[in-house]
């Protein structure tokens, strides 16, 4: 899990050279916890400029699917999920509950600006409510957060995930 590559053309060369110039900055690693016997996430997240205030932001997922012959199939599935706080509290509530327990962040909006750290959050997730089932395979998900009125990109996070049969 990482921030998306900077948009040099949209932000200017100066902004693209900084580590993170967005309203959500994430630094995370997935590792295997032998005690829990599952993969876990250790993460540091910084929230800025009121990104998690109700009515300020929207979320879109742009999903690519890996094909061993032709590489990434871009825009395999694009989903405009809607207002960020609605998404946070309803659509991805199960994921956020796990991350909130590990980091102490609120599970309800608004979420204060600041830096949040968490470790040992389970990375093995059950199917999400309101989300289509995906065929087994490898996916690259760009989670794009934009201003509700300005449409300016406020954050982008990239995750590569495998959909595998349940054991």
Image (cartoon, rainbow, N blue to C red):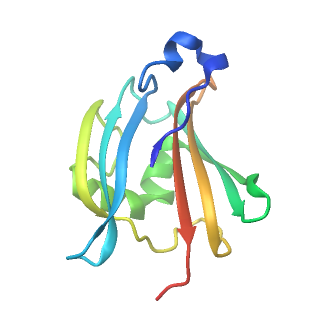
All told, the count of numbered labels is: 0
In the picture, measured across the screen, residue 135 lies left or right of residue 102, that is: right
Where does the image place residue 82, in percent across and percent down from the top left? Answer: 60, 45
Q: Position of residue 106 (x, y in %)?
A: 27, 47
- Which residue, as the protein is rendered here, is positioned at the far bottom? 167
Compared to residue 47, the image places residue 103 above or below, namely below
Of residue 166 and residue 82, the one placed in the foreground of this image is 166
Answer left or right for 42 relative to 125: left
Q: Toward which corner of the image does residue 133 lie, by quadrant?
A: bottom right
Residue 57 rendering spot, x and y as whole percentages: 52, 34
Residue furthest right in the image: 70
Above or below, 9 relative to 100:
above
Residue drawn at x 24%, y 51% is 118
For the point 43% across and 28% down, which residue is it?
A: 23
Residue 54 position (above or below residue 129): above
Side (left or right) of 82 relative to 95? right
The residue that appears at 35% across and 52% down in the rendered structure is 29
Residue at image point 61% right, 54% down:
140
- Tell me which corner region of the image, top left, top right, bottom left or bottom right, holds residue 124: bottom left
């Amino acid at each position: 899990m990482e921030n998306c590559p900077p948009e040099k053309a949209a932000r200017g060369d100066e902004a693209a050279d900084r580590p993170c110039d967005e309203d959500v900055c994430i630094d995370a690693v997935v590792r295997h916890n032998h005690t829990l016997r599952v993969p876990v996430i250790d993460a540091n997240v910084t929230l800025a400029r009121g990104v998690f205030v109700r009515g300020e932001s929207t979320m879109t997922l742009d999903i690519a699917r890996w094909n061993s012959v032709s590489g990434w199939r871009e825009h395999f599935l694009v989903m405009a999920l809607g207002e960020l706080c609605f998404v946070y509290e309803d659509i991805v509530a199960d994921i956020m509950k796990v991350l909130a327990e590990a980091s102490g962040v609120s599970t309800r909006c608004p979420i204060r600006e600041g830096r949040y750290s968490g470790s040992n959050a389970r990375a093995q997730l059950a199917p999400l409510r309101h989300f289509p089932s995906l065929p087994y395979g490898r996916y690259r998900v760009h989670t794009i957060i934009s201003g509700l009125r300005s449409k300016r990109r406020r954050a982008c996070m990239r995750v590569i995930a495998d959909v595998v049969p349940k054991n």
